[in-house]
Image (cartoon, helix red, strand yellow):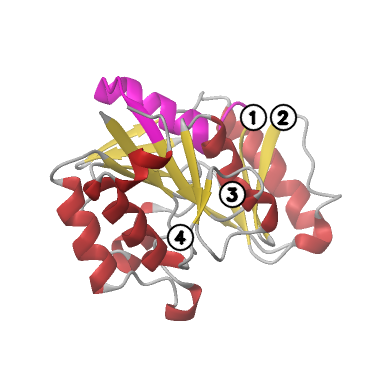
Amino acid sequence: MFLVASDYDRTLASEKNGFIISDEVKEKVNEFSKKYPFVVVTGRERKFIKVLAKGLNPTAWVLENGPLLLIGEKEIHLVDEDWFEIRESIVEKLEKLGLRYSIGKIIIYLDNVGNFSNKLRFDCARVEWNRNDAMIMPKNMDKGKGLLELVKILNFKGKIIAIGDSQNDIPLFKVADYKVAVANALDEVKKIADLVLNEENGKGVISLLEMIESGNLFKKIDIN
């Protein structure tokens, strides 16, 4: 048995389409999820996913880059209460820096702040990057740790196949048994992938799912 864990932005959905998932990808993932566990692991908030991925029905979601799980309508927050005091102190520092930010249920988002990477370092929190966008979250949390907590809840005992494109997918790759990069992935992600697909974004995900269903993926790897 295996579980597929997929990033969303620039993996399931293309930036060229405003990150709105295509009907073709949606239908394929929904069909696949009826037979095998499929989890979307993303930095996105639930409120944005509802708009961008309307009608997408995976087995579960790992949101806000790890600390928020969504199984059906049940939300599970993987965070200590002291985080919210820590978050307030970080927000004060961001305001002093003059940076624009938004706050999710747990994490802090900053768009296009790559030039401030040296100033976005906190002993009390973890900073994850997705290209030039930053996410500030509890120190002990990332996509990989969020997925592992979900796996425990689902009582899943098989292998994990992860697919992604950017820096914040590297922790996801670290907990996977097999790592797949879409064609538009960053070079640093491609370097650690077991397989780099020929197709970009959702077309790459469709290709991967078809390889799994046909058994062709397992002819290349020892994952059974």
Label 2 and label 3: CA atoms lie apart by 13 Å
The location of residue 218, given as percent across then percent down, is 34, 38
Residue displayed at 73% across by 48% down: 92
Quarter of the figure with residue 210: bottom left
Front: mark 4 or 3: 4
Mark 2 closeness class: few <14, some 14–19, many ≥20 residues within 10 Å? some
Q: Over which residues does the magenta segment extend?
A: 140-160
Give the label on residue 11, or none: 4
Give the label on residue 170, or none: none
Amino acid type for the residue under numbered disc 1: Lys
Which of the two residues, 122 or 97, is positioned nearer the viewer here? 122
Residue displayed at 54% across by 38% down: 173
Q: Earlier in the sequence, mark 2 or mark 4?
A: 4
Q: Earlier in the sequence, mark 2 or mark 1?
A: 2
Front: mark 2 or 1: 1
Q: Earlier in the sequence, mark 3 or mark 1?
A: 3
The location of residue 10, given as percent across then percent down, is 49, 64
Label 2 and label 4: CA atoms lie apart by 30 Å
Quarter of the figure with residue 114: bottom right
Is 174 situated left or right of 51 in this image? right
Is 133 situated left or right of 114 in this image? left
Q: In what element is the residue under mark 3?
A: strand
Residue annotated with mark 2:
124
Q: Earlier in the sequence, mark 1 or mark 4?
A: 4
Residue with the most extreme front position:
219
